[in-house]
Amino acid sequence: MRATKSRLLGIALAAAAVALLALVGPAGGAPKQRERALVTLTLDTLPIANGFPLDVGIAKGFFQAQGLEIKKVVFQSGNDIVLAMANRNGDIGYIGWVPAMIARTQGIPVTTVSASDVEATSEADNWQNIMVKGSSSIRSPADLAGKTIAVNALKGVGEVMIKAALKKVGVDPGSIKLVAIPFPAMRTALANGQIDAMWAPEPFVTQALTLDGARVVMAPGPVLGKYFPIGTYVALHDWTTKNPGLATKFHDAMSQSLAYAQAHPDEVRALLPPAIRNIRLPVWSSLIDRRQLLQLANYAKEFGVISTLPNLTQLVPASIASGLTLQGTVSGKAISLKLDGKSFKTLREGSYTFVVGDRSATQNFHLQGPGVNRKSGTKQVGRLSFTVKLAKGTYTFSSDARPSLKGSFRVV
């Protein structure tokens, strides 16, 4: 009986996962404005947690305020979305950066209309990982050599990141076998022994960990870099040329949605079924780190996913803001702020995304400086994330409850 209930719960959650991005759609948002008609945009997307800011933005009326209504169509991989858009089935698509690069180098001229998400900094907080069964003999990345790993699509984000990360830790990337399995079917394939490991994002990570007793053996993104770029919203170049106003409106509504989702994680979780509200949320940012994007392009070329490097200027136009992500940490005894895992004393003027891990129920992280005054609550424990523009001057970060916990940097 217990096994039957477990299977039924797993089936229910898998079904919920496929419908995650449909939980809050246009029907769940604010009432339509009667004084003007909304323009409907068809958005091709994936059944993963990365799209939650879009759902939040729809619910909050951010898109409606721009005169837009979003119709979502769910696919199983970014490559599928690229093909759909090439056939004019969709105005905008949420895809990984690798499928976007493949599209550009194969004559499908997609261009970025909004940033979206990046990975985290460690296996402990990352939302997209390689997992194995709890009973598996695979205990470390080295043990993945010669094993079969499921990805949602071949020649995609997973293939590039897994191979690049394995090479970085000294494992021959050519020794693994990758098979394409849709995200919702991976857990069953792992349980049945069809595969040795699976690479998947949330909500499938938490489902595998909590329902199946699976283990994380590697987080490829954090191995490659802090806050490594993953997803983006794109449109065909000729669509943006013919519809510049719509592209701008979508960008603005999406940026507002990303910022709101960063600042209100509890509202994001409220969109989920109770059984999976404890998932690891992606790190969302309206900024694009062009340095890491070039690194990802080089990895894609190295592992044969693309034959030439894409024109990143055409893929990511100047209208899409560049910026770096900073990692803040506060505990009962220390406070820090790092870039690429290292402390710093100066930054260049511009926009930055701050991702702060607040580990103390008595301290907080308070950033102050020209035009900026942002802080977490002293009783808040978790992640605080926000994007701000830093002007020239001195900025301090400290704990209000313990002023001796402090640091500073200058913006030049």
Image (cartoon, grey):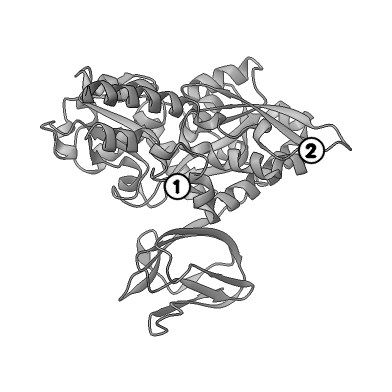
Q: Nearer the viewer, residue 334 or 155?
A: 334
**Going by the picture, which residue comes out furthest to the right?**
35
Q: Count residues near mark 1 (Cα–Cα under 10 Å), then give few for <14, some for 14-19, many for 20+.
A: some
Q: Count residues near mark 2 (Cα–Cα under 10 Å), then give few for <14, some for 14-19, many for 20+.
A: some
Left of 114 or right of it: where is 66?
right
Where is mark 2, residue-wise?
67
- Kind of residue at disc 1: Gln
Query: How far apart are the two marked residues, 2 and 1, measured between alpha carbons?
Result: 34 Å
Indicate the quadrant containing the C terminus: top left, top right, bottom left or bottom right: bottom right
Q: Quadrant of residue 401?
A: bottom left
**Going by the picture, which residue comes out furthest to the bottom?**
404
Residue 351: image x %, image y %? 58, 60
Residue 153: image x %, image y %? 40, 22
Where is mark 1, residue-wise?
292
Indicate the quadrant containing the N terminus: top left, top right, bottom left or bottom right: top left
Q: Nearer the viewer, residue 174 or 251?
A: 251
Residue 339: image x %, image y %? 41, 62
Label 1 near label 2: C-beta < 8 Å? no
